[in-house]
Amino acid sequence: MRHRLLVPLLFLLASCASPYATRQPPAPSPAPAPPAPAPSPTAPTPVTPPTTSGDMVFDAWASDFYPRAIKAGIRPEVLQREMAGLTPDPRVAALDSRQPEFSKPLSEYIKGVVTPTRDAIGGRKRVEVPQLDFIEVTYGVPREVLLGVWAMESGFGAIQGDFDVVRSMATLAAQGRRRGFAEGELIAALKIIQSGEATRAQLKGSWAGAMGQTQFIPSSFLAMAVDGDLDGKRDIWNSPADALASAANLLSKGGWRSGESWAREVAVPADFDWSLSEGPRLTPADWAAKGVVRADGLPFNAADQAAPAQLVAPTGANGPIFLLFPNHFAIRKYNNSVAYALAVGMLADRFSGMGPLVRPWPQETPLSLADRMTAQRALAALGYDAGGSDGLVGIKTRAALRQWQKARGLTADGYLSAAMVQRLTLEAQAPAPGPTPAPPPAAPEAATPPRPTAPGPQ
Ligand code: CA
C-alpha cells in the first residue's frame, strides 16, 4: 500500500510539484549488476564509516541505521556508496513540518482538480495508450479510473517530482517524527538500487518519497509495480503502460470489484436519519427502503444492486450526497483520503462521458486550525467525545457533531460549517443552566463573520 495517509491531503499538490534538483550528486549507480547473495548470517558485520554530513543528528541517525540496513539485506558496498556524502535536505524537513493555517475546503479541492483541461487530456489518453485494453482485461479496473489516478498523481506523468528519494527518506528518518515509515522506504529504495531495477538517478519523486507517473513509494514499487508494456522492466517513470498497470494491480489487490461503480450521487428524504451517514454499508435496495434514491432518478445497475454501500455527505446536507461502493474504498488503498478518492472517481466519471453532479458543490467557508480545535474543545466541554482537539476533523469529530446536532434539533449531518463552529463556541462558553445568570440566546446561523479565504493550492 502506498501509505500516503501519512501525508496530509494539504500537501498533495506540493508533493507532486517539487522542483528540487540541486543535491550534492551521489556517486552514480553502476549499470544493473546481477544480484549478489545476501550476506551470510554468520559473516561479521562490516565496519562502516558513519556519514559525515556535519549535521550531528543526521550523522548519529546514520550510524545507527547502517547495521539495521545491513540486517535488512542491503549490501555494505551499496550502503556506503549511496550514503556517502549524504546530507539532510532542509526542504524536505520544512515541508514535513509545515502546518497550513487554513484547510482547503473539499469543494474547492474538487473544483481545482476536476477541471475541463484534465477532462480533455483524459479523453485523449483513453485511446493513446495502446496497452489499456490489456490492462483492463488483466486487472478488471476500468481505464477511466486508472486515468483518474494518473491525472491526480502526476498530471498524466507531467509532474513526477524531482527529489532524490534516498536523501528525502534519510532526512525524514533522521528527523525522527516518521522514522519507522521513512527507514522502511529508504531500505526499499536501496533494495531497488541494489537489484539493478532502477538507478539512484532514476529514483526521483515527491519530497515524501512517491515516485513516477503513479507516485508509488519504494515499498509499493517493490510489492505492486508490474510490467505493463511487456518489455521485461517495471518502469513507472517513463512507461505510461507500466505505471497504469501498476496502479491497476494496486487497485485490484486493494479489493476492486469489476463491473461495480465507485459511487453514485443520491438524494435523501427531508426527514432522513443522518445518524446513518458514514455508518452501515447497505445495498441500494435497503437504502431505497429509507427513501434514498439515485439523484438522477435512474436505477442502479445489476452489479451495484448487490453491493454494500455507505452513505456520505462530504459537504453536509446541502451538498452532493453519495453512496460509496466498495470500489471507493479500493481507491482509498491508494491514498486514504475521501477527498482524493472522490476526485479520482469524479474524474473517471468525466472521462466516461458522464455529466456533472445533479447537486453542485456548495460554497464553503474555510476553517482555520483554531476554528477546528475550538469546535472540538467545545464538543468535549459539552460532553461529546470528539476524539481530541488536534484540529483534524475525522470520523470521531463528525460523529460527536452529529450527536450534538441531533440533540439540538439541527440537521445532524456532522458537517462542521463556520456557523456550527460559532454555535458550538457560544454554547460551550455559556454558563451552565441554572437560576442565575440566564444563558445567552443561541447565535443565529446567519451571524457568521466573513473569514479570510484559503491560500492557493497547498
Ligand atoms: Ca515495462
Image (cartoon, rainbow, N blue to C red):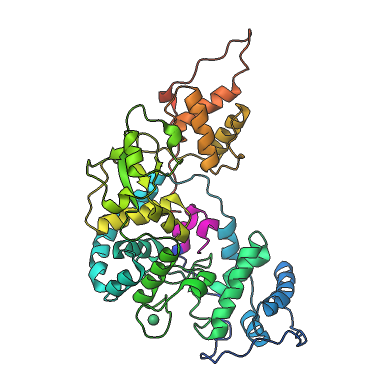
Farthest residue to the top: give it. 435
x, y (%) of residue 251? 41, 63
Q: Is residue 299 above or below residue 221?
A: above
Q: Nearer the viewer, residue 404 or 167?
A: 404
Bounds of the magenta segment: 1-15
- In the image: residue 297, left or right of residue 373: left
Q: Nearer the viewer, residue 372 or 198?
A: 198
- In the image: residue 373, left or right of residue 132: right
Residue 427 in view of the camera: yes
x, y (%) of residue 192? 54, 80
Q: Residue at x 42, y 50 (%)?
A: 339
**In which quarter of the view is residue 286 placed?**
top left
Asked if the stretch drawn in magenta spans residue 106, the answer is no
Q: Nearer the viewer, residue 26 or 413?
A: 413
Residue 114 in view of the camera: no
x, y (%) of residue 357? 27, 45
Q: Residue at x 59, y 25 (%)?
A: 428
Q: Is residue 111 above or below residue 151?
A: above
Characterize the magenta stretch by its predominant secondary structure: helix
Q: Residue at x 72, y 67 (%)?
A: 57
Q: Nearer the viewer, residue 117 or 355?
A: 355
Q: Residue at x 53, y 45 (%)?
A: 101
x, y (%) of residue 326? 40, 53
Report the number of numbered marks: 0
Q: Where ligand 1 lies, by image quadrant?
A: bottom left
**In which quarter of the view is residue 181 placed?**
bottom right
Asked if the stretch drawn in magenta spans residue 10, the answer is yes
